[in-house]
Image (cartoon, helix red, strand yellow):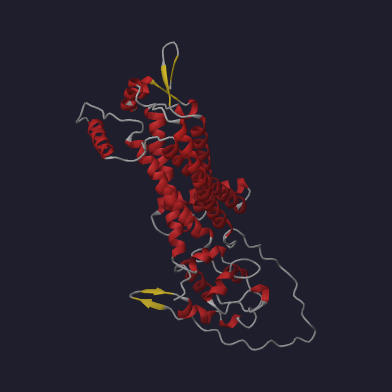
Amino acid sequence: MTTETTNVRKYYRFPVPYRIEHWLTAGSFIILAITGLIQSGSGAAETTSGGRLWHTILVGLEIVSKSIIGFLGGIEVVRFIHRTAAIVLMLLVVYHFGVVLYRLYVKRYQPTMLPTTKDAKSAWQTLLYNLGFSKKRPQQGRYTFEEKAEYWALVWGMVIMIITGFMLWNPVATTSILPGEAIPAAKAAHGNEALLAVLAIILWHLYHVLVKTFNRSMFTGYLSEEQMIHDHPLELADIKAGVTARPLNPRAESQRKKVFWPFYGIIGAVLLAGIFAFVTFEQTAVAVPPAPEDVTVFVPLTPTPFPTAPPTLTPVPVSEGENVILTWEGGMKELFSSCTACHGTMGGLNVSSYSSTLAGGASGPGIVPGIPDDSVILQVQEAGHPTGQLSPEQIDTLRQWIAAGAPEN
């Protein structure tokens, strides 16, 4: 579709539903980026790698991150906003999947976003042109190779973020299948992919749509003829030749709709059920343990002696070459052995087995593999447990084991 003004001829490129989907995606991405990066940056200064300059940068990043978290209302609010934006983005994925199927199957649109060998040639020719070795720009169609690369990078990044996000959202379920080291690995992959996506948007997307040329198509839906000649000359040639708008058989299109809607209804319901399971699978990563409270303990006039607790054993680390790996079976089980006299029922906490220790009790998850500060048992011990207090060395060993992913064997 084209429209003409006094001097400028424009071509209709993106209808309103396309633009709404784009801005909802952009909004959820921006919220995810901000709330995710400040959570990562709030502990940036704890790293020991790098020199003084790098440490100073990390300290500054931590100060800024904690300031933003405080401005937004605290870490619980930030986590809620982050997860809400993640749910919105996943719902947009389900919608986009249906839209793509509808365009391809019902409307019989060409799959113009699929990469082809011509895109590789266009990328090479663009490189030669930018370096001055060629005087001819590549002729590209509906979508340029730059736009295709960005789209499929978004798809691939979304897959990584959803998988690692599920692992971080459901750490106990994850470690019941995978080793505990999977949690810190997922955290690293999630954070690094987020950083890569933010840099790609700033350095790649914003350059092409704001700096290289100011592309107004996602605001107005139209591109000028000059921009079409510059970026999409092959599509412009097809428009002028009248070969882009192919009439469809209304009867055949109606028949395809009758097939599409039941099919997508089933697929969409399955995907929505998957999102619901994603969100409600477990609550350990969502609930923030309450702050410890000082309470007055009743002490009878004639104290009744407690049973003598078994001696506390020193965890026996498992050696792997020159590295020392703490495991549940290799020493941590014995560390908790003195706690089982009380913690079979108290607060619902049971530390007699690996799985029950991770699950925790009424106050939240006992151990969150890879995240010591979210582990209730460590929080209570570091705050000073009234009975059964571990020694500073044992608490340090406990923190090292959790940070390593709390491996079982």
Q: Image quarter for residue 231?
A: top left
In the image, what residue occupies the spot 26% across and 31% down?
130
**Foreground pick, 331 / 210:** 210
In the picture as drawn, the residue positioned furthest to the top comes out as 6
Q: Could you tell whether 251 is left or right of 68 in the image? A: left
**Foreground pick, 354 / 145:** 145
Q: Could you tell whether 280 is left or right of 160 in the image? A: right
Q: Could you tell whether 269 is left or right of 146 in the image? A: right
Q: Image quarter for residue 377?
A: bottom right
In the image, what residue occupies the spot 49% across and 45% down?
93
Depicted 10 relative to depicted 106: above or below: above
Residue 406 coordinates in the image, percent (x, y): 48, 70
Residue 63 coordinates in the image, percent (x, y): 53, 49
Residue 38 shows up from this direction: no
Residue 366 coordinates in the image, percent (x, y): 58, 69
Q: Quadrant of the C terminus?
A: bottom left
**Foreground pick, 320 / 115:** 115
Q: Quadrant of the N terminus?
A: top left
In the image, what residue occupies the spot 45% across and 62% down?
184
* Number of numbered discs visible in the structure rendering: 0
